[in-house]
Image (tube, rainbow, N blue to C red):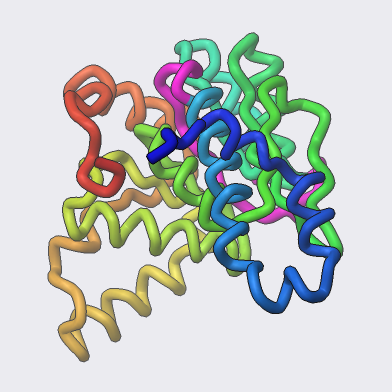
Amino acid sequence: MRPIRFDALVSFRRCDYASAMSDTTFRMRGEDPWRIFRIMAEFVDSFQTLSEVGPAVTIFGSARTKPGNKYYRATCDIAKELAKHKFAVITGGGPGIMEAANKGAAQGGGKSVGLNIELPHEQAGNRFANIPLHFHYFFARKVCFAKYSLGFIYMPGGFGTLDEFFEIMTLVQTERIPQFPLILFGSEYWKGLVHWMKAEMQDRHGHINPGDLDLFKVTDDPQESVRIILDYERRVGPPAMMPKAFA
């Protein structure tokens, strides 16, 4: 059997894939088997780049947050302080909170990582990410958020922010990744969700254990957010081995 050339497989990039997919017959009969090469290319590129950034913290939040907003300013302050402590800051690479985090990290002289995603109506990459990566697949991007961070900060946001919060919560709760710091920033914004989780998910229906609500912290203080991350790094540090979710 002839050996498979891995470099040849991952060289089947976006332009080659798009050309093949434009053929109707190909699309009907062979779309899924060939799609794996595009998926593989996204993982190879992103893993290679992100494995070199060092300890990192991911910051999530709304793409619609404006620069004058208090959460935009707080995000910028948090990211700048993290960068000064030699943390890379990872975001979704778009506008709003993502822009604020990338801006703060860049101003702090740190690595400002933007994992941008192709969307139909929004999500142009922001200019402050000095390590930009571009994704077609949401699932590949989501793996990179979880795989290369040792802390997660959730600023006020919409469905995407909630999606990332509950995904990481699930991975921590099921012990697929270590109990990394999970921080909900903005008590006024998050109090309704926290109350619902306790009243409905925990107390009324018993769908979660009481200790599960201790897996995250709520704060309004940028300095406390940074202290939580620094304390975790001091006490625990990066995982000694690959987390189960990625092994």
Q: In the drawing, does residue 55 fall left or right of residue 129?
A: left
Q: Is residue 127 magenta?
A: no
Q: Residue at x 64, y 44 (%)?
A: 92
Which quarter of the figure is the C terminus placed in?
Answer: top left
In the image, residue 182 sits, relative to residue 197, either above or below, namely above
Magenta residue span: 51-74
Quadrant of residue 76 within the rendered picture: top right
In the image, residue 130 sits, relative to residue 125, either above or below, namely above
In the image, residue 191 sits, relative to residue 116, either above or below, namely below
Q: Position of residue 120 (x, y in %)?
A: 83, 64
Q: Nearer the viewer, residue 114 or 63?
A: 114
Residue 141 seen in the current view = yes
Q: In the drawing, does residue 110 fall left or right of residue 151?
A: right
Q: Nearer the viewer, residue 101 or 55?
A: 55
Q: Is residue 56 magenta?
A: yes
Q: Nearer the viewer, residue 187 or 13?
A: 13
Q: Position of residue 86 (x, y in %)?
A: 47, 12
Q: Residue at x 60, y 17 (%)?
A: 111
Q: Residue at x 84, y 54 (%)?
A: 19
The mark total stands at: 0
Q: Residue at x 44, y 67 (%)?
A: 191
Q: Residue furthest bottom?
A: 204
Residue 70 seen in the current view = no
Q: Position of residue 199 (x, y in %)?
A: 28, 82
Q: Position of residue 183 (x, y in %)?
A: 40, 46
Which quarter of the figure is the N terminus placed in?
Answer: top left
